[in-house]
Image (cartoon, rainbow, N blue to C red):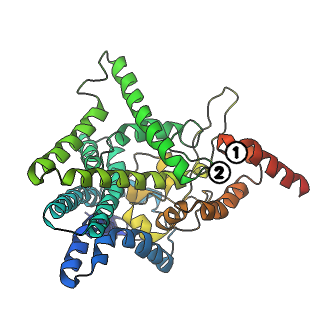
Amino acid sequence: MSTATLAPAWRDSKRYLWLFGAAIMLVPVLGGLLYEATGWAVWWWLGPLFVYGVIPIADWLVGTDTNNPPDEIVPTLERDRYYRFAVYLAVLTEYVAVVWGAWTVAHGDLAWYNLVGLTITIGMVTGVSINTAHELGHKTDKLERWLAKLALGPVAYGHFFVEHNRGHHVRVATPEDPASSRFGESFYAFLPRTMIGSLKSAWELERKRLARKNRSVWSIRNENLQAWAITIVFFGALTAWLGWIVLPFLLIQAFYGASLLEVVNYLEHYGLKRQKRADGSYERCRPEHSWNSNHVVTNVFLYHLQRHSDHHANPTRSYQALRHFEEAPQLPSGYASMVVLAYLPPLWFKIMNPRVVAHYRGDMRLANIKPSLRDAVLARYSRSAAAG
């Protein structure tokens, strides 16, 4: 029975749009078909053209949606299996795209610039697929948790399954979290810090968990090793089938895909900080500790990831039931547009730094600041406050 039948006064206006989360995985295949039809090399670059160009423009044209499902319908909405199958389909289409991409690299006789475009386009698919894994990995169902690991296989970022759930969600918006960016920190400084820090954290989290069970960290029960094994088997199988030529392609697209995840991490909590209580522990994560956006198009492709505050408040809540909070700080545009800004640090700082300052009403002692800049930032804004 559909949710519309049970609650005719409210319907999910995005219900059938959620299938675009699976459709976006096939963008590389569409690019290849368009190249065959036209001979235009630009189609191998359809991934970045779509993510960095089409989606931001569509966000601007379509606008925002702050509509929340009524509380009484949320349990029924969560039980509607249609929404789960829409996510499962995205895992399947991700593998279709990567296998097709590897085959094309091996047999397509592409010019180097076309090969670069295809690699980046596939990397965008696997980068977006980390968000699919994110949606699945927060669930308690064993099948969905394994599907999350499977979705992380082509992007070689299996430790995200451990670090995000048990690391980031515990330390979010604190200086100790490698996935929370700091005021004044560029994306290019954040990227190595978060990649290395998240990997080390995931390994340590599993080491401690397994030690409590009197097991070695090298146990088959290590969830990092389980997820990495999927990558090794998948990459190994494609290399054995298609030859060594595909291995550099697989590794480069994986790195690019992982960087796409991390640039989204960069903008989700930039400069925001949970404050410490008298006992030294951090306050509970609240809506004001995440940057949000209600731009419809990016939300459809990312399963409402931009309603990030509700996700942190209710990590197991399914994407279709996530809510907008009026008190949550809002980004000036959707994630797709903000990713482009993050690649351009001077423009990012010009647009986002004043928003962080305004969020804390000029009291930058409350912000998460890059340590090397902290004294200068505090001095600058304390003078501004005194002058005001």
Q: Which mark is residue 9?
A: none
Judging from the image, what secondary structure is the residue with disc 2 in? loop
Residue 196: x and y in percent read: 45, 38
Image vertical order of residue 347 relative to residue 138, above or below: below
Q: Quadrant of residue 373?
A: top right
Left or right of 361: which side holds 211? Answer: left
Q: Quadrant of residue 281?
A: top right
Residue closest to the eye, 225 or 170: 225
Q: Amino acid at mark 1?
A: Leu
Instruction: Check disc 2 and report the residue beneath it.
Output: 184
Q: Quadrant of residue 233?
A: top left
Q: Residue at x 72, y 55 (%)?
A: 357
| Quadrant position of the N terminus in the picture | bottom left
Residue 13 can be seen, yes or no = no
Image vertical order of residue 387 relative to residue 164, above or below: below
**Mark before the other along the chain sequence, 1 or 2:** 2
Residue 306: x and y in percent read: 48, 59
| Quadrant position of the C terminus in the picture | bottom right
Residue closest to the eye, 75 or 147: 147
Q: Residue furthest front?
A: 112
Instruction: Check disc 1 and report the residue beneath it.
Output: 373
